[in-house]
Image: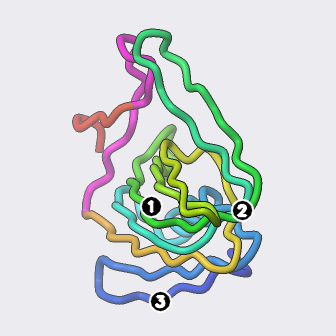
Amino acid sequence: MLKAMKSARLSDTTYALRLERGDDIHTVVQEFCAEHTIANASLTGIGSIENPKLAYYSIETKQFTERPLDGIFEVTSLLGNVGLLEGKPLNHVHVTLSDSLMQVYGGHLVSGACSATLEIFLHQYATSFGKQFDDAIGLNVWDFGSH
């Protein structure tokens, strides 16, 4: 059971999540989806994040290059989706962040904890598509034949 994060159901398919300081973004979203039996969803958000780790994926090397950022950053845009991997919700999130000098960073969100607050809208879909590893590109991708 999630303890710090607060949530509200806005409609039959949409939730608002408010993360509290220290909440791990990936953990909160994945646990919320598991608790509410949400297999597929899209998410958007704004707020602040502390000590995030971002990544960039190279199709040539089939590897992520990670970059940890120290400090507190504004989340100016958070976009992502939820799919099933091995039967469990897995979120895939990209962010655009700005620092105190309003310099912008962006990429795949590897990890990060909520700083002051983080507000996420999660829209559930009536599907249960999974993700499957694709050897050609080296990533887990949507498998629209699985549901």
Q: Is residue 28 visible?
A: yes
**In the rendering, at what x and y percent does residue 109 appear?**
55, 47
For label 1, the residue is: 78
Going from N to C along the chain, the mark reached first, 3 or 2, is 3
Task: Read off the magenta span.
Answer: 126-140
CA gap between label 1 and label 3 equals 19 Å
Q: Closer to the camera: disc 1 or disc 3? A: 1
Q: Residue at x 41, y 80 (%)?
A: 15
Badge 2 amino acid? Glu
- Picture quadrant of residue 134: top left
Badge 3 amino acid? Ala
Q: Closer to the camera: disc 3 or disc 2? A: 2
Tell me the SS state at disc 2.
Answer: strand
Query: Eyeballing the image, is 26 above or below 15?
Result: above
Q: Residue 20 lies in magenta, yes or no?
A: no
Q: Residue at x 51, y 38 (%)?
A: 86
Going from N to C along the chain, the mark reached first, 1 or 3, is 3
Going from N to C along the chain, the mark reached first, 1 or 2, is 2
Q: Residues within 10 Å of mark 1 (few under 14, many from 20)?
A: many
Tell me the SS state at disc 3.
Answer: strand
Rendered image coloring scheme: rainbow
Q: Residue at x 23, y 35 (%)?
A: 145
Residue 8's label in the rendered image is 3
Query: Eyeballing the image, is 97 above or below 123?
Result: above
For label 2, the residue is: 50
Question: Could you tell me if the residues under marks 1 and 3 are in contact, i.e. CB atoms within 8 Å?
Answer: no
Badge 1 amino acid? Leu
Query: Eyeballing the image, is 18 above or below 36?
Result: below
